[in-house]
Image (spheres, grey):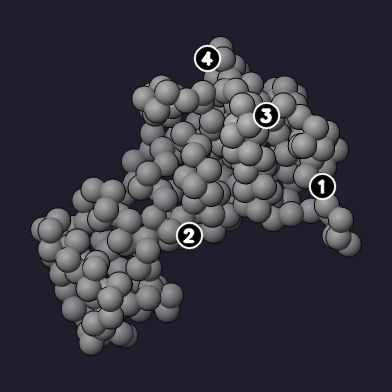
Amino acid sequence: MDKIEGRNAVLEAFRSGRPVDKLFVQEGLTNGPIQTILREAKKAGSIINYVSKDRLEEIAGDGSHQGVVAQVASYEYATLEDILKKAKEKGEPPFVIVLDGIEDPHNLGAIIRTACLAGAHGVIISKHRAAGLTSTVAKASAGALNYVPVAKVTNIGRTIEELKKEGLWFVCADMGGTTMYDLDLKGPIGVVIGNEGDGVSRLVREKCDLVASIPMKGEIDSLNASVAAGVLMYEIVRQRGLS
């Protein structure tokens, strides 16, 4: 079993229809968000346990649970076919996010959250040397993990080649590329974001059709991986809106 912490993440788990086995609620909390979660839990038939603050922190493992923790089945990974099917069902050109070695679960969760809001059809992560789907990722995604298919693959480069056969082309984020505003980022596209420290690996970069750089004017020369992903995703959203 896995756990989800935080009001938004727990509420979205219920609203998405994800089975919640048990709900742990801090005794004495009666505010609006908690009442909404309790209503959803009762509709879903989940077991509700009222526990002390100390017990809830013991269950959660930290103090940032916001008074509620849900116990759920572990997240299931999607397939590439699931992601492409979602795009087809929406009648949209595929828009996928490919993560080449993202290790920080908070970054992964934030990227999944932005991918959901930007209308991406799925996220692809690596099986090796990368963060997987955990309760920390679920919480950082603020519930978006319940809506965005996430596929785990053995080889990112080979996966890019497979998706190219399906008509996608790929752009990776890198400081040495062409300014993203000067690139045509419409159509079926995959956005590749690299590791927090090393960026996109050489082999993966060589598989990409375009390299996009994000204009920066400050004294430091790089963005957090999840921020860079968000900026590039929303340039794609902007360009799609113009087409």
Amino acid type of the residue that numbered disc 3 sits on in the rendered structure: Leu
Name the residue located 59 percent from the left edge and 34 percent from the top edge. Answer: 241
Question: Which SS class for mark 4?
Answer: loop
Disc 3 residue crowd, few under 14, some 14–19, many 20+, Cα 10 Å:
many
Name the residue located 76 percent from the left edge and 29 percent from the top edge. Answer: 183
Question: Which SS class for mark 1?
Answer: loop
Amino acid type of the residue that numbered disc 4 sits on in the rendered structure: Glu
The residue furthest front is 242
Residue 151: which quarter of the image? top left
Does label 4 or label 1 sit earlier along the sequence? 4
The answer to which of 116 and 110 lies nearer the viewer is: 116
Alpha-carbon distance for marks 3 and 4? Answer: 17 Å
Assign the N terminus to one quadrant of the image: bottom left
Q: Which mark is residue 215?
A: 1
Which residue, given by chain and number where applicable, does mark 4 sit on? 166
Disc 2 residue crowd, few under 14, some 14–19, many 20+, Cα 10 Å:
many
Residue 6: which quarter of the image? bottom left
**Could you tell me residue 242's position as x and y percent?**
63, 31
Alpha-carbon distance for marks 2 and 4? Answer: 31 Å
Q: Which mark is residue 185?
A: 3
Alpha-carbon distance for marks 3 and 2? Answer: 27 Å
Which residue, given by chain and number where applicable, does mark 2 sit on? 140
Amino acid type of the residue that numbered disc 1 sits on in the rendered structure: Pro
